[in-house]
Amino acid sequence: MGERIRILHIEDDEVVQMAVKRKVKVDGLPYDIDVAPTLAAALELFGKKRYDIAVLDYMLPDGTGLDLLPKIKGVPAIFVTGSGDATVAVKALKGGAYDYLIKDAGNEYIELLPATIEKVLRTFSLEQEHIKDEEQIRILNKELSKMYEEARECSLHDPLTGLANRRLMEINLKRDIERTKRTDGRLSVLMLDIDYFKKYNDTHGHPAGDRLLAAIAKVLTEEVRGADLVARYGGEEFFVLLPDTNLDGALNTAERVRKAVSGSLGVTISIGAVSYRKEEKMEEFINRADAALYRAKEGGRNRVEEG
């Protein structure tokens, strides 16, 4: 390693402290070592400086190394224990230590210290890279999920009016038809379009026409229930899905919408209103609504026709 390694040696035995420093000096090891003889001194140093690794003795004047392990998360530790303390070593590994060394009478274990430090730092570095990669993957997945939802939102909504588009309308209509079949419930729809919209565009320009479409979308949304779905069916046509609504309810809603548009926007709309017939296919249901709309336009526009 090119950079010097910052080590906190937590050891109260001065003979061991000197033996480690002698090993570093004789072998020319790239270590900068601070010594802490107690847990309290170690915690104080951890609060002041950043260390790459800790070499932690088991028995200390004010506690054990096991007490310190939970408090130095983020700094890899080598646990040093006396011979015959295999159970303690296992506890240390479970508590977060990366490796352990066993003391002997002649402190020969210190010869193993450099290789152990190198191994632990390599393991710790790989773990940190893995954590970073996982975080990047998590962020990427979150961004992809957001992009997917945005794309899905765009694919199911009309960008001009913000309403559901025809695709989303058909998804909801199919679902509501299946539910109506199961429960023998009621379901109605409105199909409407703006009277003389082409003339309006030719007179006022396409930007004004777009503003009118958005304004009608707003009126429709305000005039129906929260459970109803308003969709832009295509061009100047709109579609309103009215679950749990019979034909009389659909006609009342249609008339309320017609009056709201003519009263606030200075244009009129024609509306076809139909209720679902048992076992009717979705395409047949939509075609009946379209036919009712056609009759409303043929009958003079600015009116509601049932189908």
Image (cartoon, rainbow, N blue to C red):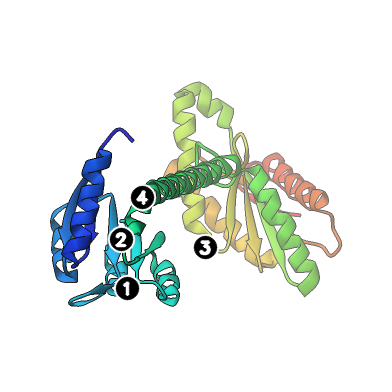
Q: Secondary structure at mark 1?
A: helix
- N-terminal of the pair, mark 2 or mark 3, is 2
Circle 2 Cα neighbour tier, 10 Å, few/some/many (<14 / 14–19 / ≥20): few
Mark 3 or 1, closer to the camera: 1
Label 3 amino acid? Gly
Q: Position of residue 306 (x, y in %)?
A: 72, 55
Which residue occupies the foreground of this view, 234 or 166? 166
Residue at numbered disc 3: 226
Residue at numbered disc 4: 117
Q: Position of residue 286 (x, y in %)?
A: 76, 49
Which residue occupies the foreground of this view, 189 or 105? 105
Mark 2 or 3, closer to the camera: 2
- Position above or below: 140 against 53: above
* 3D distance between C-alphas at marks 3 and 4: 65 Å
* 3D distance between C-alphas at marks 4 and 1: 19 Å
Residue at numbered disc 2: 107
Residue at numbered disc 1: 66
Q: Are discs 4 and 1 less than 8 Å apart at CB?
A: no
Q: Position of residue 158 (x, y in %)?
A: 55, 40
- N-terminal of the pair, mark 4 or mark 1, is 1
* 3D distance between C-alphas at marks 4 and 2: 16 Å
Q: Secondary structure at mark 2?
A: loop
